[in-house]
Amino acid sequence: MDSMIPDVVLIGSGNTKSIPVLGLGTAVYPFSPESVKQSVLQAIRLGYRHFDTASLYQTEQPLGEAIAEALRLGLVKSRGDLFVTSKLWCSDAHTHLVLPAIHKTLGNLGLDYVDLYLIHWPISSKPGKHELFMDKEDLLPMDFRAIWEAMEECQKLGLAKSIGVSNFSCKKLQIILDTACIPPAVNQVEMNPFWQQKKLREFCKEKGVHVTAYSPLGAVGTPWGANNVLDCAVLKEIAETRGKTVAQVCLRWAYEQGVSLVVKSFNDKRMRENLDIFDWKLSSEDLLKIDQIPQKKGFPNPKFVYEKGPYKSLEELWDGEI
């Protein structure tokens, strides 16, 4: 079937590539690739066209297998109908390892290019270990300029159609922008009604950097996630009034903020519900109520803070955006 999901043009990477505003995330915790292939195939049947992975997630290979199967079955006409995002992990965030890393990603996916390649976090680590919660002694400062030059090479070689960053503060994004020949097209960050990222979104808008929201429902089911978003009384009241689920209210809210969003659910019913956000609107009263929700970041990632590491506090990691 054709997709009903709107696109938005990425203006940052010096081209006119479009990104579907709703994507399916493939990060399963604990990392488990087994369920990914069939879930992606079903998502494609339902109309999803944007799929978000990363070398860390161990889901590149099953995602690639699903894409190959979808093409074989005629669920999509061509590779160009799909939008695939992957990410450079910290242990590969070294000048000489960026190109080998994207080549490995493309080999895992069985693709000639990714549509978007992101620096996963603004920190490097000792090469060789693909672990989310790494030894703090392995944390290393990132050479932003050198790594971004290597990312630009990925785009120049056609290995990535667009390039960007993830989990970057305004300050760290500005460091990239100061020397970039190709500016970041995207900054993928945590964003939901409990962490609305108003300052960062305004900054990115001024700089022409598109924002993609991850954890738009609060990362339920992950080690750091919580139910505070889906259990929020304000959001429940809005959902009841609108005849929608709380998840649909959260996703519609993010969409109305002008961002794209990546939501992870392999449940068929919820995948269908998550698509039902485009033919209705939140009222100005709804938006005001959401705007007044007290803010609390769900995933500050203290594992990247170490007294002998590049970031000695959460304030340094997030440059006060915490």
Image (cartoon, grey):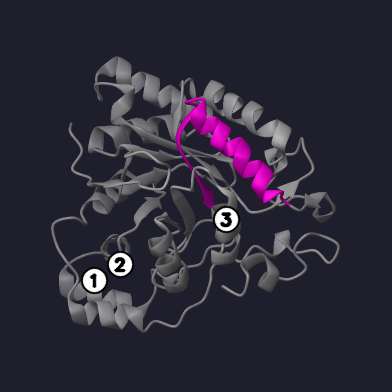
Which quarter of the image is occupied by the C terminus? bottom right
Q: Amino acid at mark 2?
A: Val
Q: Residues within 10 Å of mark 3 (few under 14, many from 20)?
A: few
Viewer-proximal residue among 305 and 31: 305
Coordinates of residue 29 in the picture (x, y in percent): 56, 48
Instruction: Tell me which residue sits at (80%, 55%) in the image.
Output: 136
Which residue matches tag 2?
246
**Range covered by the magenta-colored residues:** 142-167
In magenta stretch: residue 152: yes
Coordinates of residue 90 in the picture (x, y in percent): 68, 45
The answer to the question of whether label 3 and label 1 lie on touching residues, with beta carbons closer than 8 A, is no
Which quarter of the image is occupied by the N terminus? top left
Q: For the view shown, which residue lies furthest in the top direction?
A: 72
Which residue matches tag 3?
178
Q: Residues within 10 Å of mark 1 (few under 14, many from 20)?
A: some
Q: Residues within 10 Å of mark 2 (few under 14, many from 20)?
A: many
Instruction: Tell me which residue sits at (59%, 46%) in the image.
Output: 30
Instruction: Tell me which residue sits at (46%, 68%) in the image.
Output: 227
Q: Work out whether mark 3 precedes mark 2 in sequence or the reverse, and give the earlier one.
A: 3
Q: Image height check: is 288 above or below 170?
A: below
Q: Amino acid at mark 1?
A: Ala
Judged left or right of residue 183, residue 24 is left
The answer to the question of whether label 2 and label 1 lie on touching residues, with beta carbons closer than 8 A, is yes
The answer to the question of whether label 3 and label 2 lie on touching residues, with beta carbons closer than 8 A, is no
Which residue matches tag 1?
239
In magenta stretch: residue 148: yes
Secondary element at image label 2: helix
